[in-house]
Amino acid sequence: MSNHLIIKKKIKDFNKQIFVSSDKSISIRWVLLASLANGLSKAQNLLLSEDVKAAISAIKKLGIKVDLKGSVCKIYGKGINGYKYKKNIVIDAKNSGTLGRLILGLLVNTSEPIKMIGDNSLSRRDFQRVSKPLSKFGAKFKLKKNKNLPLIISGSSKLKPIQWYENKGSAQCKSALIFAGMRTKGTTFIKAKKSRNHTELLCKYLKLPIKIKKTKNFDFIKIKKINKIKKLNYKIPSDISSSAFFIVLTALSKSSKLLIRNVNINPSRIGIYTILKKMGINIKFKNKRIYKGEKNADLEIKSTKHISPINCPASLNTSAIDEFLVIFLIAAKAKGVSYFKDLSELNQKESPRLTWGSRILNKMGVKTVVYKNSIKIFGQPDLKINKKIVIKNFLKDHRVFMTSVVAALSFGGEWKIYDKDSINTSFPNFMKVINSLKKND
């Protein structure tokens, strides 16, 4: 079976209600915390992507029983010190930076060395950003080229609390330190640049000993050693990062309307909402509610005729870091020049996304100017594509694939997009949802 997708025509207008895939960040964090809980935790609507399946496989190797039927998952936690495993085990994080980095925080006191591997894309990403602070707790690391996978972690039975300044806005690094602090006597202090806070909200809901002081640009976090985690039953909401593709597809269409149901709108994740509102996109939150500390809502999006360019505030970067590729498509149709700056973290993802964002736009005929960590996009309000475009060799980055699909359906042309199975990382039923919108055709 071929592993590419061919799109030859734009999508017709639609008026639909949809559900998108469950939140990946929350799904993986639920798996890890449930593995430490005392007793049975149950999740409904768990995301069944390759990243989440990798997390489930990892805790199984650590001796945790898992019962998975459909999107309902039961995890039989054995307590904070309940991991039991054989010597020389290997954990495969696949493509998941979230799993690869977070679980290291839970392995800082392992009695035996554990090896971690990942796919080609993950193996190129920087793990020193998490191994460096975790080594200060007392764990030891061996990494390829001092920063890459595969790595070997050797835990310590004499962990020491640390003070650490997390200055990259990485929720993965911050969460790994929180998990390590849970295992360490004393108080660990973290000064963290603003980033998504699902871990902190779950810890607060579970009434774990974590204190957070928020300022405009930083969170000051104190975490103490914990002895017990209560079971965690959870119904996973939809992912705003997965919703982003359908938000943009609707906004760029001629006359469409879409309602995306039960989406997580954690304030640390809604940068795309703020950015698109500034650009004039017709998007609203409806039926807001709180669920176990997390904010959820339905998203209503309508087509937008006049799109304004943006000089995007860098303060919004961390809350939109996974959505910039598809945001760039909005900028491609704006009347004027949009500028996005300080996006170094964009190249720390599955592929160098700043480079790929520019490359896709250039293939579409949109002018860009790329600096070291910034990009200018010269919008074309009347942009229409009447040529063949091929997208390949993008390290199987799921967001490059899905962004290319949205571009093809929005602007026309004949597209050949490779590695369609890359969506299994985060959104296995992406094309199924796309096709549900095309039923009007």
Image: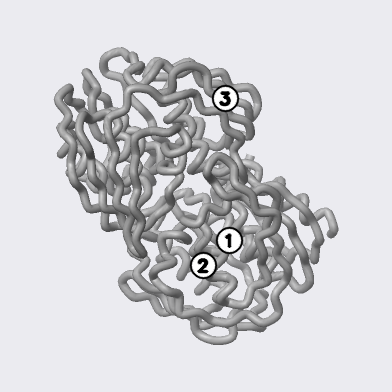
Q: Which numbered marker is on residue 404?
A: 1
Q: Nearer the viewer, mark 3 or mark 1?
A: 3
Residue behind mark 3: 42
N-terminal of the two: label 3 or label 1? 3
Q: Identify the colour scheme used.
A: one colour
Q: Secondary structure at mark 1?
A: helix
Q: CA distance from mark 2 to mark 1?
A: 7 Å
N-terminal of the two: label 2 or label 1? 2
Q: Is residue 194 above or below residue 53?
A: below
- Would you say the residues marked 2 and 1 are in contact, meaning their CB atoms lie under 8 Å apart? yes
| Location of the N terminus (image quadrant) | top right
Residue type at the position of mark 3: Lys
Residue type at the position of mark 2: Ile
Quadrant of the image occupied by residue 281:
bottom right
Question: What residue lies at 34% left-to-right and 69% top-to-bottom?
Answer: 342
Residue type at the position of mark 1: Ser
Question: What residue lies at 70% left-to-right and 58% top-to-bottom?
Answer: 286
Could you say which is closer to the camera, residue 394 or residue 219? 219
Q: Which numbered marker is on residue 139?
A: none
Q: CA distance from mark 3 to mark 2?
A: 41 Å
Give the farthest residue toward the right. Answer: 440
Q: Secondary structure at mark 2?
A: helix
Q: Judge the density around disc 2: few (<14), some (14-19), many (≥20) Cα neighbours within 10 Å.
A: many
Residue behind mark 2: 360
- Would you say the residues marked 3 and 1 are in contact, meaning their CB atoms lie under 8 Å apart? no
Question: What residue lies at 26% left-to-right and 57% top-to-bottom?
Answer: 167
| Location of the C terminus (image quadrant) | bottom right
Residue 172 placement (x, y as % from top left): 36, 45
Quadrant of the image occupied by residue 336:
bottom right
N-terminal of the two: label 3 or label 2? 3
